[in-house]
Image (spheres, rainbow, N blue to C red):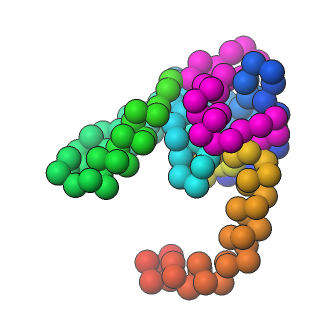
Amino acid sequence: MFIGEYYHSLDEKGRLAIPVKFRSAFRNGAVVTRGLDNCLFVYPQKDWLALADRLAKLPISKANTRAFARMMLAGAMELDIDKQGRVVMPDYLRTFATLKKNVVVTGLYNRLEIWDQTRWNQYRKGTEGKSTDIAEALGDLGV
C-alpha cells in the first residue's frame, strides 16, 4: 500500500529516486503513464497489467472510453529501476506533467503520483479548501 507525500528532486538526466519504502513493490517492474490532473501515475507491473486489461475491455464504440484508453495506454512506458532506486522519467511525460526540478511523490494505495511541487501545492491547497464539499459528495457513494 502506497501512502504519504515525499519531496524529491529530478536530476539533470531526468532521474527520480523512488522513496525507499516503496522500492520493493517495484522489484518485478513498474510502468509510468499520463495521469489525471497533469500528474504522472506509476504502477507496479502487476497492478498496471490489471488496469490495462480493464481498459482494453472498454467499449471502443464510445469516444470517451477510446480517448481515456489512448491517454493511459499510449502514454505508458516501462521503467527500469537502477541500483540506487532511481528511474528515468521520459521527456514526453515530464513535459506533460510540467515537471521541473522539485517534485512530490504521493502514495495513493495502488499507485504513486508524480507531481511538480508547485502544481501539487496549488492542487492540495485548493482541494483542502473544498474538503467539506468533497466529503459530502463522497457520502453519496458510501464512503
Q: Compared to 10, does 84 lie above or below?
A: above
Q: List x then y, in percent, for residue 137.
A: 51, 82
- Report the residue at 81% width, 35% height from top: 101
Residue 38 falls within the magenta-colored stretch = no
Q: List x then y, in percent, for residue 119.
A: 73, 53
In the picture provided, is 78 more to the left or to the right than 38?
left
Between 15 and 48, the residue placed more toward the observer is 15
Q: List x then y, in percent, for residue 27.
A: 58, 23
Residue 122: image quadrant is bottom right
Q: Compared to 139, does 89 lie above or below?
A: above
Name the residue furthest top: 83
- Report the residue at 58% width, 30% height from top: 92
- Report the residue at 39% width, 36% height from top: 73
Which range of residues does the magenta coloring cover? 79-103
Residue 81 falls within the magenta-colored stretch = yes
Q: List x then y, in percent, for residue 46.
A: 44, 33
- Report the residue at 35% width, 44% height from top: 69
In the picture provided, is 69 more to the left or to the right than 139?
left
Q: Is residue 1 visible?
A: no
Q: How many marks?
A: 0
Q: Compared to 35, does 90 lie above or below?
A: above
Between 96 and 53, the residue placed more toward the observer is 96
Q: Is residue 102 visible?
A: yes
Name the residue furthest left: 61
In the picture provided, is 96 more to the left or to the right than 57?
right
